[in-house]
Image (cartoon, rainbow, N blue to C red):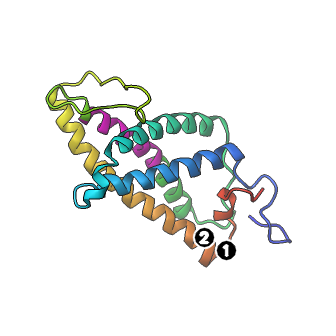
Amino acid sequence: MRGSAGRPIAGATYSRVAIAFHWAIAVLVIGNLIVGIGHQSIPALRAWMPAHKAIGVTILLLTAARVAWRLAHRPPPLPAATPAWERAAAHATHWALYLLMIAVPLTGWMMVSGPEGRRALTWFGLFDLPYLPVSGGAAALGGEGHEVLGWMMAVLVAAHIAAALRHAVLLRDGVMTRMLPGRR
């Protein structure tokens, strides 16, 4: 929503905390998608796999904090002219992203926790992370789920970026600027 000066209406932007969560997690998710999807075909990305795991755990923890924040703090409303289908799609996409930001790291953690062929699991080399108590079958299921959910995450992230750009470039309705740092 915009006022007469073209600036977002007071109260129509996200809080600084919500903006910080959004951009921190966004950068980590996009980086992890690049490493996770590309590490098998781009040898240079294989060296990033220990960081990929640590970043995944970081995403999981930040997402838990973000969801708690989101449940306690209402986001600004969409413009009144937003069609019902678009509101429903936006809400469904956001909650699906939250779900994936939890499920993707958890399935990766399951995958590396299997009793056969355990892989090193540290948080940026500072300390070891515990393995989840899973069977070999559950670890294999985690690995398959991690791949499928990772691709789903990539698709939803692309859709989210496309929707943000649509609001910024085509609709020019101020929806995207509500999440930009320094726009309060």
Q: Are marks 1 and 2 in contact (CB under 8 Å)?
A: yes
Q: In 3D space, how far apart are the residues under numbered discs 1 and 2 (Cα atoms)?
A: 6 Å
Farthest residue, direction bottom: 170
- Which is more toward the observer, 122 or 88? 122
Answer left or right for 168 relative to 145: right
| Dot label at residue 167 | 2
Q: Amino acid at mark 2?
A: His
Categorize mark 1 by other alpha carbons within 10 Å: few (<14), some (14-19), many (20+). some
Above or below, comparing residue 44 to residue 107 in the picture? below
Q: Return the residue nearer the eye: 133 or 35.
A: 35
| Magenta-highlighted residues | 96-111
| Among the two numbered marks 1 and 2 on one chain, the one whose residue lies closer to the N terminus | 2
Q: Quadrant of residue 30?
A: bottom left
Q: Does the magenta segment cover residue 108?
A: yes
Within-10-Å neighbours for mark 2: few <14, some 14–19, many 20+: some
Can residue 175 be spotted in the picture?
A: no
Q: Is residue 122 visible?
A: yes
Q: Residue at x 50, y 64 (%)?
A: 161
Q: Position of residue 73 (x, y in %)?
A: 67, 39
Whole-percent x, y for residue 116 in the image: 14, 29
- The residue most toward the right is 4
The residue positioned 67% from the left and 43% from the top of the image is: 17
Q: Which residue is mark 1?
A: 172
Picture coordinates of residue 3, whole percent (x, y): 83, 67
Q: Position of residue 151 (x, y in %)?
A: 31, 55
Q: Is residue 128 left or right of residue 65?
A: left
Residue under the point 50% across and 39% down: 63
The answer to which image quadrant residue 122 occupies is top left
Instruction: Give the quadrant of the N terminus.
Output: bottom right
What main secondary structure does the magenta stretch of the protein show?
helix
Q: Amino acid at mark 1?
A: Arg
Helix, strand or loop for disc 2: helix
